[in-house]
Image: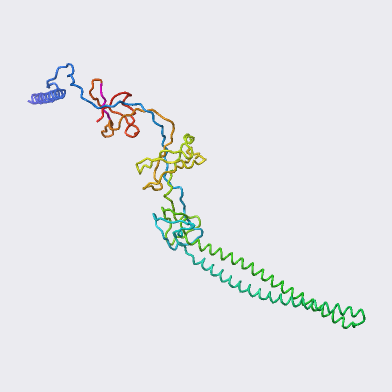
């Protein structure tokens, strides 16, 4: 019994395996189309009459070769406004984006951008003014004393002249025995006293003059200190260097500023330009005053600029030269935008077709080409630059072929 049961089980497994195998064979035959009625091979069905098509020929045209160089939009005039003294910011009167007015001979006063703490400088100004007033009083007093000393010197001079004449007469009388020796000695003593008084008066005049010179020197020093203090005081008011717009504010009230530390960035939007780093091989193709194509990507429109400056030195790391190109003022221009300039580098030839003949499916481009039998055939192409209503075809077409226009 056991042997029969084992034989039966083995037969059953074999039948199962055979059934699965047969099922797989039938499924594969069905997938391969074994049970579908096939059409016998034969010649293709004849095409109908070719449709009436509006076409244009693929042309080979010559275009100027423009090599683009990247750059950054800037302005011709920009200034980092900083303080000339070390002080604390007391007040800020402008914000980023505000328009400011610079100094002009007959125009309004320049815009005050910020005010610094001026208490120490004000104290120096008051101290210098007080010293100057005291010096003026001392000068007036010394000049009054000098006037009196001159009067005394004149009187002493007159007295000396009189005493000298008296001594001369007495000496003549003494020689002629008309005057005694006592009279001569008295006249000589009077002359000597007059001389001493005259010398003293002159010394007093000299001393007062020396004092006046010292006071005047001191006054010059104090006047210079006062002028310096007033100049320092004027530096506590930060004004706009020229008319433009505040594009950046780098300080807050309470900050300590120092000479050379930027407080504001002021730019003028009247003179925009592109600063481009041009390859050293392309620099000989440019010259100052030359017109070149420019494009600011964010504005999505090209314009024309003029080469304003070519910096006469190259960056040894990148082998590029800085070229500055002036462009027309346009709404929406902001410093720092990405821009390109086109450098003319000769010409090149390219196949072109009308832009409307090219269709786009996803990232693929194709055109309908008129075949030899007059029927349109789809052909995928690679497109290049656009030139007005025409577009370059880099691959997929040949010169003279006809493409269908919609």
Is residue 179 shown left or right of residue 312? right
Seen from the viewer's position, the closer of residues 39 and 56 is 56
Point out the stretch of residues depicted in magenta: 366-371
Is residue 76 shown left or right of residue 206? left
Q: Look at the image and say whether residue 370 sits in the magenta stretch.
A: yes
Image quarter for residue 19? Answer: top left
Q: How is the image coloured?
A: rainbow
What residue is drawn where x is 66% and y is 73%?
A: 143
Residue at the extreme right: 177
Horizontal and vertical percent position of residue 211: 67, 71
Vertical arrangement, residue 6 with respect to residue 78, above or below: above
Is residue 177 shown left or right of residue 58? right
Vertical arrangement, residue 273 with respect to residue 141, above or below: above
Horizontal and vertical percent position of residue 344: 43, 34
Q: Main secondary structure of the magenta part?
A: strand
Q: Look at the image and say whether residue 39 sits in the magenta stretch.
A: no
Seen from the viewer's position, the closer of residues 165 and 130 is 165
Horizontal and vertical percent position of residue 95: 39, 57
What residue is drawn where x is 89% and y is 78%?
A: 172
Horizontal and vertical percent position of residue 58: 31, 26
Image quadrant in which the C terminus is located: top left
Image quarter for residue 173? Answer: bottom right
Image quadrant in which the N terminus is located: top left
Total count of labels: 0
What residue is drawn where x is 43% and y is 38%?
A: 292
């Amino acid at each position: 019994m056991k042997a029969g049961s084992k034989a039966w089980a083995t037969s059953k497994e074999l039948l199962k395996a055979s059934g699965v195998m047969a099922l797989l064979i039938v499924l594969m035959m069905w997938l391969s189309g074994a049970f579908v009625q096939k059409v016998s091979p034969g010649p293709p069905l004849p095409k109908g009459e070719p449709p009436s098509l509006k076409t244009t020929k693929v042309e080979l045209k010559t275009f100027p070769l423009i090599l683009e160089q990247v750059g950054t939009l800037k302005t011709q005039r920009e200034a980092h406004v900083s303080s000339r003294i070390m002080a604390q910011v007391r007040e800020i009167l402008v914000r980023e984006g505000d328009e400011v007015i610079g100094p002009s001979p007959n125009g309004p006063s320049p815009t005050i951008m910020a005010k610094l703490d001026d208490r120490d400088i004000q104290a120096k100004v008051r101290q210098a003014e007080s010293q100057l007033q005291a010096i003026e009083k001392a000068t007036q007093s010394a000049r009054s004393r000098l006037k009196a000393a001159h009067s005394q010197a004149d009187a002493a001079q007159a007295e000396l002249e009189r005493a000298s004449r008296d001594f001369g007469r007495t000496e003549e009388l003494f020689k002629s025995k008309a005057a005694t020796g006592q009279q001569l000695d008295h006249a000589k003593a009077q002359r000597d006293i007059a001389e001493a008084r005259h010398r003293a008066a002159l010394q007093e005049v000299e001393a007062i003059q020396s004092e006046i010179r010292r006071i005047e020197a001191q006054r010059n020093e104090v006047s210079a200190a006062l002028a310096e203090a007033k100049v320092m005081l004027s530096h506590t008011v930060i004004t706009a260097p020229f008319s433009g717009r505040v594009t950046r504010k780098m300080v807050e009230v309470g900050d300590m500023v120092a000479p050379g530390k930027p407080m504001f960035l002021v730019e003028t939007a009247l003179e925009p330009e592109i600063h481009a780093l041009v390859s050293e091989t392309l620099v000989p193709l440019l010259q100052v005053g030359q017109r070149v194509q420019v494009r600011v990507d964010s504005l999505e429109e090209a314009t024309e600029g003029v080469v304003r400056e070519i910096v006469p030195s190259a960056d040894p790391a990148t082998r590029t030269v800085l070229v500055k190109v002036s462009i027309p003022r346009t709404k929406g221009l902001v410093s720092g935008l990405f821009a390109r300039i086109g450098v003319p580098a000769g010409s090149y030839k390219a196949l072109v077709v009308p832009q409307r003949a090219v269709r786009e499916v996803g990232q693929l481009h194709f055109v309908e080409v008129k075949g030899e039998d007059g029927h349109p055939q789809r052909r995928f192409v690679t497109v290049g630059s656009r030139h007005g209503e025409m577009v370059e075809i880099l691959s997929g077409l040949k010169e003279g072929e006809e493409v269908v226009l919609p």
